[in-house]
Each structure stands twice: as C-alpha cells, then as structure tokens.
Image: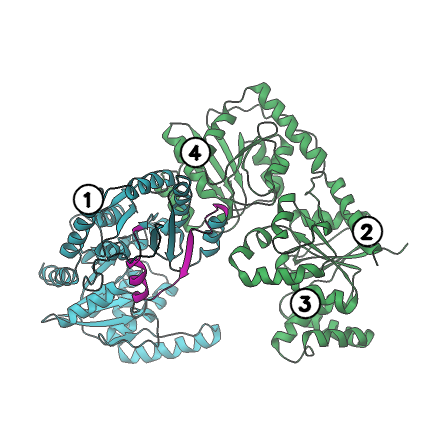
Chain colours: A cyan, B green
Amino acid sequence: MRIGLVLPAVPAYSETFFRNKIRFLQEAPGFEVVLFADRYSADTFDLCPVHYAVQFSSHPIIALFQYLGYFIFIGFRSPGKIFQLWRLNDKAGYGLKKNLASVAMSAHIFKQEVDWLHFGFGTMALGREHVARVVGAKMAVSFRGFDIAIYPLKHKNCYSLLWETVDTVHVISDDLLQLVHKQGYPNKKPAIKITPAIDINKFKRAHKANVGSNVLQFITVARLHWKKGLEYTLEALAQVRNLGIDFHYTIIGEGEERERLIFAVHQLGLKDQVTFTGRLGQAEIIEMLHHSDLYLQYSIQEGFCNAVLEAQAMGLLCVVSDAEGLAENVLHEQTGWVVPKRRPDMLAAKIEEVVRLDEVARTAVQNRAIQRVKDNFNLEKQGTGFCTFYLQTGQA
Amino acid sequence: MKRIKVAIYSGAIPSTTFIERLIEGLAEQGFEVILFGRVKQPINYTSPHIKLVGNHSGSRGFLESTIRFARLRVTAPGKYKKLMQHIGGGPLSGMSAFRSWQVYAPVVLHLPDIFHAQWAKSVSDWIFLKEKFGVKLVLSLRGTHVNISPLANAALAATYQKSFKHYDAFHSVSNSMVKQAAKYGIDENKAQVIYSGLPYQPLPLESPERSETLRILAVGRFHWLKGYHYLLDALAILKRKNISLKLTLIAQGDLPEEIMYQLHDLNLETEVTWIPGLPYQQVEAHMLAHDVLVLPSVEEGIANVVLESMQLGLPVVSTNCGGMDEAIVNGQNGFLIPVRNPEALAELIMAVKELSPEAKNLLRQKAHQTITENFNLEKNIQQFVTMYERIKSCA
C-alpha cells in the first residue's frame, strides 16, 4: 500500500511524530511512503522519496512568469487531471484565483500513484479537497490542535467542503475528536484516534543527578507562544515562591513571546529563579530533564504534547493544564496532576501539594506514569495503529 | 526675537494625538516647529510656523530626496561634507547610504536649534547632530521603548547606556518612567516629568440612560502589555456569578488569535464587542455610554485613555502599573488594582457598579478636577516651552 503524506516541509529532526510514522511504515511489510512537501528545504531527508510543490518567487513579476511557465508545463504533463480538478473545484464554488492556486499547489502530486493521500494537518487539505479523488486515492486528514481548535475560529466553516470529500480523519486525542465533530464532521464517517508516541529507549528513567543543593528543579520544554500558558505558569511560580518553596525553573524553547515572558519574570521578581535556555537539542533536553524534579505544562491550548510523554517516561512528576489532549496525556492523580487552565492560584496550590508529597506517594505516581507511557505511547503501538488505520479504512 | 526652531521627531507624520497637540501648542507659543519623518497621511497645519519636511514614499519620495541632496550640496557644502563623513559615503554610494541620506539630509538642511526625539529606540541615531552641528538634543521617555524592550534586548540596553549621556534633556511622561530610564544611566537631573495634557472641557452631565447590564469599556491597541486576557478572565468570573455584562473593546489591529481563542474558550463571544479602532470623537461617545472603563495593562506610562475617561467622568478601574498611581488616587478619583489579578479586577468592576449615586458623583468630580489641575494642555505646553528655553539658553 502506497501512502502519500502531505506536509508543509520535510519533518525536521525534532519532529519525531512524522519521522517515526514514516520510518515505521517504510519498514512495515506491504507499506511504502512518499512525501509531498509544500516548502522546499535543503535539509537531507532519507526516510522516503520526497516531491516538492513548485516554489514561486516572492517577486510578483517573476512569479507571474513562473506561473505561466508552470501552467504550460503541467498542462502538457497532466492535462486530464488538471481538467478534472478544475471542474470539481469549480462545481464546489471555487473562484478563478482559488482554483489556480489549488492546481498550482497540487500538481506535484498528480504524477505519483498512491492508495492514500494523507494530509498531515487539517489546514493543509484546504484548497486540495478534491486532489485525492483526482489521483484515485483515498483521502485522510490529521487534526493535531491548532488546525481544529483555533483555525476554524478565524475561518468559519472552513472545513465544510473537506467533510464531504475526506474518507477518514485521524486525531491525536479524544478532545480533538469532539472538536472535529463540533466543526461538522459527520458522525457516520470514520474517525480514529492515534495518540503520539515516543521512543521509550531514549527517554529512560532519570536518577536525578545531585546538583549540590536542595533547590527543586522545575522545567518546561515549549515554544515561547501564548498557547503554552507560560505567563500563567510564571504567575503561579511567583505564588509558589511566596509560600517559601525554594525552586529554580528552566524554560527550554524560543519564540515570539520572549519579551512578554522576560518582562513577566522581571515584574514578578523571579529573575533569580527562572532561566530561559533558548532552543536546545534532544540530548541537551534529556540532560536537563535528568536534573529536574517537576515538569510543568500549563498550556492554554494543546493537542497532546510529546514533551509531557517524554518527561513522564523519565519519571518526572508532571503537573499539566486541562487543555484539550493534556488531560488524556496525564491521568489526574494517577500519573500526574491536571489543573484547570488560566488559574495560576490553583496551579500554585497543586505545585505546593506535589512538592510536599512523601517519597512513597511520589514514587507510586512516577511508576504508574512510566508504565503507562511504555504501554500506551510507544512507537510500535503508534505504527501499528496507522497500519490498521489504512488497511481497515481502505477496505471499508 | 528670533524664533526657536524645534524639531519634533516621531518618525511618522502625522503623529499621535498627544504629539500633534504639542506641535500645534508650540507653534502658538512662538516656536518654529519642524517635522521630519515618513509622511503616512496628508496633513495640513493652519499655523505658518509649522514646517513639514517629511519623506513621502515611492517616486515622489525619491524625487524630493534627490532635490534635497542637491540643495544641501549647493547651499551648504560644509554641512554636506560633515553628513557624508557621518554616513560614510555620498547618497549614491549604496542603497543603505541612500536611505540614511533620506532620513538625515532633511534635518541637516533645515537644522533646528533643538531636536526632540519622541521615541527612545532611535536614541543613538541623532547624536551626530549634537557632535557635528551643535544641535541640542531632547528625548521623550515613553512607552515600551523604555520600560519593556531593553529588558529582553541587551544590545538595546547597551545602546541606551552609551547614548543617553549625549542628550541635553529628557521629557518623561511619568515619574515612574524616569526611574525605569535611570536603570540605563540617564542623569535624573536632566529629566523633567511633563504629564500629557488634555484641552479643558467641563465635566459632562452623566447620561440619564440606565442599564441593568454592566457596560464595560476598554480602549487601546492589541498588545500583550495591555493585559486584555486578564480582563477576559475577570469577565468569565463575573459571568459565572450571573452578572449581566457587556464589554466594548476598541482596539486597533487584527483580533489576535489569543484573544479570539479565549473569547471562544470562555464562552464570552456574545458579551464582547470588538471595534477595530476609532477616532477620538467616537471613542468619547462610547465613554459617555458606558459604566466603567477598565485598563488591565501589565505596564504603562500613564495611559491617555484613562485621562480622557477621567475628564469625561467615566469611572476608571486600572491596574497599578507604571505611572497610573500618579493620576489615580485609589478610591477617590478612580480605582487601582494589582496587575495580573482577574479576581481583584472582577471585584472592583462590581464595586463600581454598586457605587451610590452620591459616591459616583463625587468620584466623577474628583477625577475631572485631577485632569483639570494636573493634566492640562496649557500647562503641559508651558512646561515644554520652559524646558526648551532653558536648554537653548545653556551654552
């Protein structure tokens, strides 16, 4: 079975979800993956063949000539498919401009024969709702968070055509599945949840290295983005500090909210307790996790969050918010703690409770979390899930 | 007596309401005001003492710049040479040199006695005016340029440290801003607090229209420092208590994803109306039709919108950040709450709703009196006049 995976670009080294999925399917008997990337990147990628969408210049006049040349080229190469796509788009009410864009961003897919065309994010399928039909493939779309929780707020009913043409959807949490249905995906159509997974051999139980002090080490690995709720986290930590708990908090990641967060640290008087490391490589992150006691992920919006799985696998106590998939990622009071989002007072109280837990209670939570990640969120399970997904839905 | 030539430089023409008021006020006081910067919109000043030497965009800008370079070369070859030394080449020596010439040549051609930069980020750009041409330099301390940006930008903080000492005077919008700037080495003796001023108007009568629904107003651009997410958290608290409320949010720019998501997530979409920016007269009409103005910011100089509300007798609930406590005396002419505290904000909004008519009337009068006495446009202009005259007279 040949799977065509449509992504914005070839997955970077840190995008373990897609890399693991591709690797697994390539190794699985009877499966083969071909990647369609919208954006060209010079990074080497050797997990599967890659076909890039045509790259247009940002200069409008050069782009115009490129457009003309490209349309003549593909007009000769795949006239039937272009005509078919154009007609289907036209019937669906596409205007001229949207239809041209649809053809331009889909033509690199036409030459490949695939059984499934799988769009890695919901937003990637917009404007390409009919491409799978044109190439004679089944159509699958994954929803991972932003694409279903936020994007439709800005673009009302953006998926209504997609719901008609897609054969099946994949989500990474139950919460997102509810959102997919809330946005109008019919209950009678198939949908499957396959949660993210991590390489449990890489994230093994940490034996906290002695850092030579009794200062508790808190940590978060996240982009500095409003969705990650880091400002609320810092507000909670200012309250934790006022409770007399001695801690240091490390935030690994970079992003557009850096100034906002540095200002919050300054205003909340946390300068000595908080470090922003910027972006780190996986080995460095693992090293930092080895030195940490408590992992915080107090997001406002979150599909599932691999970083929380990794922290649990390493035996860090995890306190997370109840944003979308997080409450599924961490089971409240069993494998960690789930606190309502945007409530720094409640987060502070929970952190206090957790750091004051006795050894027995702490170890019990750690053990349950490690075991649950091993059992439920391993690569094998994820890979098998996808194989079943394509096989069963393909037969349906 | 020869008029003092003051350049008011904000980078954009026209500038903000408050800077525009300063420009017109100074011209009335006998100054010759020169405006440099990019012309964003056409503007006509009635006063003959306001000279516009802005840069237009496109081919018009190219042509006017070329004429200016030529004029400078012919009429003031000495100045031309000095500017060439400063930029490191002539106007045709490269794209970046051409752009620098576009910015600096008009200023050198119409050399002012005093150059007043309105925003701190450009602080290092103008030191050459003093070093090569003997122009006095003034800098306004306002906004995120002083109280936020240098915290996260070490290079900017270092630039401030190096540049501030070259300036002859600093105008600060609040005492708190002087303290912030002192971290980057300004000489506090050179700083003068001149509060923003409003033209006088009497306290309007309170609108007789009563509403069971609490009508909350917030005004200001979308930026994280405005703390709108805390206001929405506070509204969610009030909604849980079954308080009937409406928020009108007048904010320029696109509705940020964060706010859009929060409105949806907290189920506040029906309670909140967003209006994407309005001219002041229309904002004023909204102020007269609401019960309370809320300023949920995490940082401010002194928010002009609060001053405007106080003048119109609209009760204000503001966070106690920046210089807000220089305008608001808590409980007397408005209300102050700690920053980042939606519970306190919700409580205070309710307290305003429950004010007795007598208490509300007293609050309105005191707020209006504060503006008339301390945030008065005439006084404000006079303070600038005195500052410029003092600087000009210093050798």
Distance of label 2 from label 1 (alpha carbons): 73 Å
Asked if disc 3 and disc 1 are in contact, CB closer than 8 Å, the reply is: no
Q: Residue furthest right?
A: B1
The residue mark sitting in front, 2 or 1, is 1
Q: Which residue is mark 4?
A: B343
**SS assignment at label 4:** helix
How many C-alpha atoms fall within 10 Å of the one at disc 4: few (<14), some, or many (≥20)?
A: some
Asked if disc 4 and disc 1 are in contact, CB closer than 8 Å, the reply is: no
> Which quadrant: the N terminus of chain A?
bottom left
Q: Earlier in the sequence, mark 3 or mark 4?
A: 3
The amino acid beneath tag 3 is Val
The circle on residue B390 is: 2
Q: Residue furthest front?
A: A212
Distance of label 2 from label 3 (alpha carbons): 28 Å
Query: In the rendered view, would you say B118 is above or below A283?
Result: above
Q: Earlier in the sequence, mark 2 or mark 4?
A: 4
Query: In the rendered view, would you say B30 is above or below A19?
Result: above
**SS assignment at label 1:** helix
How many C-alpha atoms fall within 10 Å of the one at disc 3: few (<14), some, or many (≥20)?
A: some
Q: Residue B369 at what x, y percent from top left?
A: 68, 30
Query: In the rendered view, would you say B155 is above or below A145?
Result: below
Give the magenta part as a residue range: A267-295
Asked if disc 2 and disc 1 are in contact, CB closer than 8 Å, the reply is: no
